[in-house]
Image: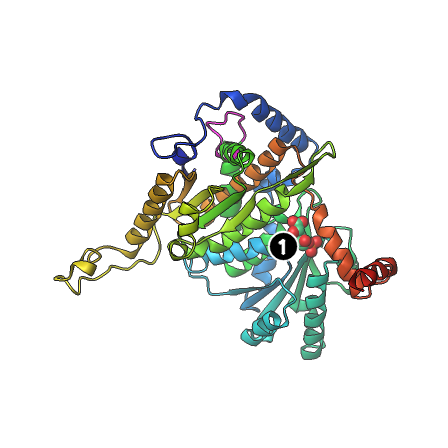
Amino acid sequence: MSLSFNFTNLFQNELIKTGLNSDLTAYQEIIDKAHQSILKQRKEDILGFYNLPEKNTERINNYISQIDQDFDNIVVLGIGGSALGNKALYSALRIEKGLTKKLYVADNVDPTLVYDILSQIELKRTLFNVVTKSGTTAETMSVFLIILQILKEAFPKDYKKHIVVTTDKDKGFLRQVIKSEGYYDFEVPDNVGGRFSVLTDVGLLSSAFVGINIDELLAGAGTMRDLCATSDINQNPAYLMGLAHYLYMKEGKNISVMMPYANALYDMADWYRQLWAESLGKKYNLDKEEVYVGQTPVKALGTTDQHSQVQLYREGPNDKVTTFLTVDSFKHDYNIPSIYPERDEVNYLGGQTLSKLLNTERLATEIALSKSDRPNCNITFPKINEKNLGEFIMLYEIMTVFTGALLEIDPLDQPGVEEGKIATYALMGKKGYDKEREEIEKILG
Ligand code: PA5
């Protein structure tokens, strides 16, 4: 294990007066019940992400070595779980690994975003990876149609080599397109939902393209999966964090802040935001009773947001649980020079490194929050690499399904998203949505 954890400030101590009692034996029954439900779902092959560490990456690695010389850029056309993990991994490793190939993610139908991406790339040297599990998502398909036309016009004979599709193995419009037009393709497994799919071909293909070692990523995920196999809450960081968040949620702490002290991990907090929000924000429990549960995930960046958010976190409503992400060692660091030895205002900084200041400020914020009785915990990356990121991803995926089991909801569905999709289809004139369009027109008056 490479990540390390500090959970001290989730529990009652000298500063966290209203924290959780560290004796968790009272919860053993609900822990066991949630653990059993996870084991059952794993047996039923519903939680496919647990098996991804054993994934065979040969086909991805072979494809990448075939096309490696042809392209400098990859543009992912996807949204939600088909985009956020790709972005997070690239952002985390781009500078640490000195990646030279570029990843762009078109995860919005904002025309300026599409223009911006197109104006930065050389089309001839760009591969487009269309990623959509359903194969029909309006945002992804509309940008794909635009790109397809551009490519057909630019390279009438070999536009197909610029496109690679990642979608369901049988279902959806895109699968039919692959079959009839013959694009190179990868698959999203049936038993892995969008927001849990970063370690499938969804996230691995673009990662391998830019030079991320995907086998290391999976190895890290495997280490965390094995560590989190036990129902012993004191040995299982995913379960411990899940239980703590669940208990705080029940006390009305309905906001979960993830605050990396590393710009490179900021997009990872965005990935977490989707995972936590879409998985746990539910109206009904498994017995179809109305429960309205969930915890709003918020991302903040240290030290930047100390000058923007921490005032609220310390003195505003005591409704948050904060998770700090710390990086021990950065690839690039700077010594702060002693240019004004006679000036106390800045002389204490001279001779120190920038990373020492960053991590000292992280600790200072932890102390400040704790002094205000605000629960928090810390996850330390010794450095940012594939193995640690794999551990982190698996940690949060397990934590999410465990918390879902404690809440007795289904963390794998997202029925609340449907209404908006249907209204969009109706308003955009999709065939079969006339009734819905009439209803909306009545509402709009
Ligand atoms: O987690 C999910 O299932 C969603 O966020 C999806 O990833 C998102 O809606 C995109 O769906 P698709 O991959 O089918 O285009």
Instruction: Please report the residue visible at 45 percent of the width from the left and 43 percent of the height from the top.
Output: 322
Q: Is residue 228 left or right of residue 78?
A: left
Residue 234 is a magenta residue: yes
The residue furthest bottom is 153
Q: Position of residue 387 (x, y in %)?
A: 46, 45
Instruction: Please report the residue visible at 43 percent of the width from the left and 34 percent of the height from the top.
Output: 10
Residue 26 is a magenta residue: no
The residue furthest front is 445
The residue furthest left is 342
**Residue 41 visible, this angle:** yes
Q: Position of residue 211 (x, y in %)?
A: 50, 58
Q: Amino acid at mark 1?
A: Gly
| Total tally of numbered discs in the picture | 1
Q: Quadrant of the N terminus?
A: top left
Q: Mainly helix, strand or loop, the magenta region?
A: loop
Q: Is residue 432 left or right of residue 305?
A: right
Q: Is residue 274 left or right of residue 365?
A: right
**Figure quadrant of residue 288:** top right
Element type at mark 1: helix
Is label 1's Cβ within 8 Å of ligand 1? yes
**Figure quadrant of residue 28:** top right
Q: Is residue 235 above or below residue 300?
A: above
**Figure quadrant of residue 444:** bottom right
Nearer the observer, 70 or 404:
404
Q: Is residue 378 left or right of residue 229?
A: left
- Give the magenta-colored segment's residue range: 229-239
Mark 1, residue position: 80
